[in-house]
Image (spheres, grey):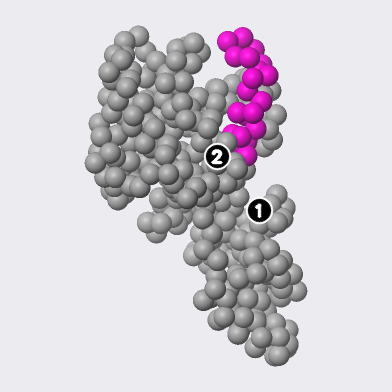
Amino acid sequence: MNFLNPLAKGLKFLFSRTLVLYLVLGVGLSFALNRKSISGHFLSQIIEFGQYVGDYYYGEEPLVAEKLDQGILYFHALSEYLASPALSYGNIGFCYFYKQDLNKAVSYYQKAISLEPRLYTFYYDLGYMMLISGNIREAVDLFSRCLALIPGKPSDYLLLLKGMPQIEIAALNTEMTLLYQRAQHDKLRVYAYLAGAYFELKDYAAMNGAAGAGVKIFPNDPEINYYAGVSSYLLKSYAPAIAYLTKAIRLEPNYSEAYYYRALCLKEAGQELAYNLDLKRATDTKQQERQKRPAYPTELHAYSDEFLFFKIYSLLRIHH
């Protein structure tokens, strides 16, 4: 059964060409490859593993440790052919993360950032690793840096491509729109991760700031409304908290945690009957809570064709 949403399907189609497009266009743009030649056999191995990573990334293949081991070897070899091996290091880190070797994964993402500090997805992935490993302050720093690099609007991509005669700008409208949509998905996740991180740090004002900024951009997302509601409750702003949590529940009717925190707000407001009703709803919906399939089944990014467009973006933004 295919669980991919329309955006993920579009990106899957766009990136199904895997590393070959990156390598070929990279030569034309004179920034990807050094002067070494690449054999057809080696390319075929990279294509095969690149396709597996893409399929696993989009939830179409199960995790196979042996293929991840192969991928680490192939991407190490590929790094010898790249003028900047940040892409390879990102993929090696991806493989180590899903092999559950967090230390090596972190090390390779740090190397990737040192070589390509303007690619937001490296900060996103490393921030996620810091978050799940309990390094909350490091996660906050990485997610904050990630936010500063995410493009603000679709035209940012196309405008920055002016002056690149090798590329037919009109042909890239679809690609750039899809990349922007993925970037917006990532931006939403970053605001949610930041809000959750500040909750762990008990910095409720910062939590409220991150959630509030997220709500302004994504007003119809239940999770970011939930975080705005919880942070407002913790800051004793009960009326806004109830409003945010009510909206989260309207958007996601089985949101048990939202019922729970709204119950606490109602108790503070002296509404005992409503408090008891929401407590019961929190218990009932905990059993029924809808398990949502994420748009992108893996938490981290896989780096293939996508990298080309972000690379163009990051290179050209410093000149505008």
> Dot 1, how many residues are within 10 Å of its Cα: few (below 14), some (14-19), or many (20+)?
many
Q: Which mark is residue 214?
A: 1
Q: Residue at x 37, y 41 (%)?
A: 94
Q: Which residue is mark 2?
A: 9
Left or right relative to 102: residue 237: right
Looking at the picture, which amino acid does disc 2 mark? Lys
Above or below: residue 66 compared with residue 85: below
Camera-near label (1 vs 2) is 2
Q: Residue at x 74, y 69 (%)?
A: 243
Point out residue 285 in the picture as x, y percentages from the top left corner.
Answer: 57, 76
Point out residue 35 in the picture as x, y percentages from the top left corner.
Answer: 35, 9
Residue 293 visible (yes or no): yes
> Dot 2, how many residues are within 10 Å of its Cα: few (below 14), some (14-19), or many (20+)?
some
Point out residue 167 in the picture as x, y percentages from the top left corner.
Answer: 60, 14
Above or below: residue 245 compared with residue 166: below
Q: Secondary structure under badge 2? A: helix
Residue range (magenta): 162-183
Residue 109 visible (yes or no): no
Q: Secondary structure under badge 1? A: helix
